Amino acid sequence: MFLKYLTGLFFNDIAIDLGTANTLVYKKGIGIVIDEPSVVAISRDNKKIIAIGEDAKNMLGKNPEEVNIIKPLKDGVIADFQVTELMLRNLILRAQKKRLLIKPRVIVCVPSGITEVEKRAVRDSALHAGAREVHLVSEPIAAAIGADLPIQKPQGNLIMDIGGGTTEIAIISLSHIVVHSSIRVGGDKMDESIVTYLRKRNNILVGIQTAEKIKKEIGSAYPLESELKMEVRGRDIITGYPITVEVTSEEIREALSETVQSMIDAVKCLFEKTAPELAADIAERGLILTGGGANLKGIDKKIQETVDLPVHVMSEALTCVLKGCGRVLDNMEEYRDVLIKKIED
């Protein structure tokens, strides 16, 4: 415990996985210190922060008019600059335990398809939040490092990171992305699909929080050995009264089918742009799945059946990107090639 305290005094550099659904923070020499939903509750009157993370997420759909619940990131990039800056400042202070004698160096994971304008927005938000310098790493590369793939060797490594707002698919060789695809479809889109499906098929209106719970408990992309069911509470669209209906895993699989298929189509499109030598490497080693969406039941089997490749889900899929980003932070010289080149002002 004392050693960790001393480490915290001398090493305050941090890595941040700034995700649409969750933001995770890694502190150099210590490990993951924060894992919170990317949600902020703000007072409409004085614009002060009321809650951040899990506390703010619990207010979703239950907040009065005086409280504004904001998800400052959309599709993997900053949608609300000011709120993102406030959230980052809070997270940096919490990671440092409010001891900011020396401003931290910060590494932030960003989607591979991010634009120059979006890169500047991420960098400026982190700088205004208290960082002394900011480096960016592409999410697929960070995920591949976290998954212990040999990215520095001249061989193809195929990674698919299913986040809240985006799904990143990339082939990596010699520490660089050779071919990539970034689609703005992920866990949030799955939740929205469940809300839409239940409204149309069951005449019941549920919130995003309920849809996320349904997805985690009985959602699947492939038929289960033993199908599941659960009771769902919501509002009857016709009468307006609260009702409870029983929903099955078969129904939720149907609700998610279009979203899952769009991810599989993105993998197929990637192969059309892939050199034969790289394709041969991937055929041997297969596809690595990371990100929170990789925990959807049967998604590996569904992809494997469709694209005829071995598919492997990482055991700690949700934290894989941050683990890789943390490894870059701990070994900056070794992984200097994976940092995104300096952003032009």
Image: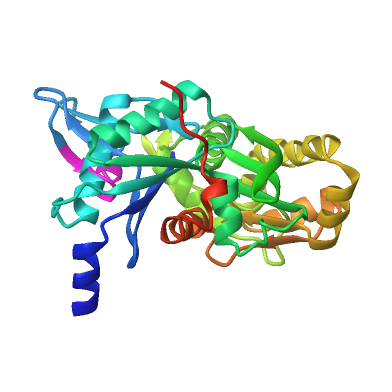
Q: Which residue is more in the foreground, 8 or 286?
A: 8
Considering only vertical position in the picture, is 63 above or below 149? above
Looking at the image, residue 294 lies above or below residue 40? below
Q: Residue furthest front?
A: 333
| Residue 58 is one of the magenta-drawn residues | yes
Give left or right: position of 305 versus 219.
right
Residue 269, quarter of picture: top right
User: Closer to the camera, 258 or 141?
Assistant: 141
Q: Position of residue 135 (x, y in %)?
A: 42, 41
Residue plotted at (27% across, 30% down): 83
Q: Is residue 330 magenta?
A: no
Give 16 or 294, whichever is nearer the viewer. Answer: 16
Residues drawn in magenta = 50-59
Q: Is residue 271 above or below residue 331?
A: above
- Does the image show residue 229? no
- Estimate the x, y position of residue 333 in percent, counting from the top left: 48, 56
| Residue at 9% across, 24% down | 46
Residue 220 locus on image (x, y percent): 64, 53
**Which of the image's four quarters has the N terminus?**
bottom left
As drawn, is 208 to the left or to the right of 255? Answer: left
Query: In this figure, what is the number of numbered marks?
Result: 0
Q: Residue furthest left?
A: 46
Q: How is the image coloured?
A: rainbow
Residue shown at the point (28%, 35%) measured from the top left: 127
Q: Based on the displayed image, in which of its 4 quarters is residue 29 positioned?
A: bottom left
> Can you say which quadrant of the picture contains the C terminus?
top left
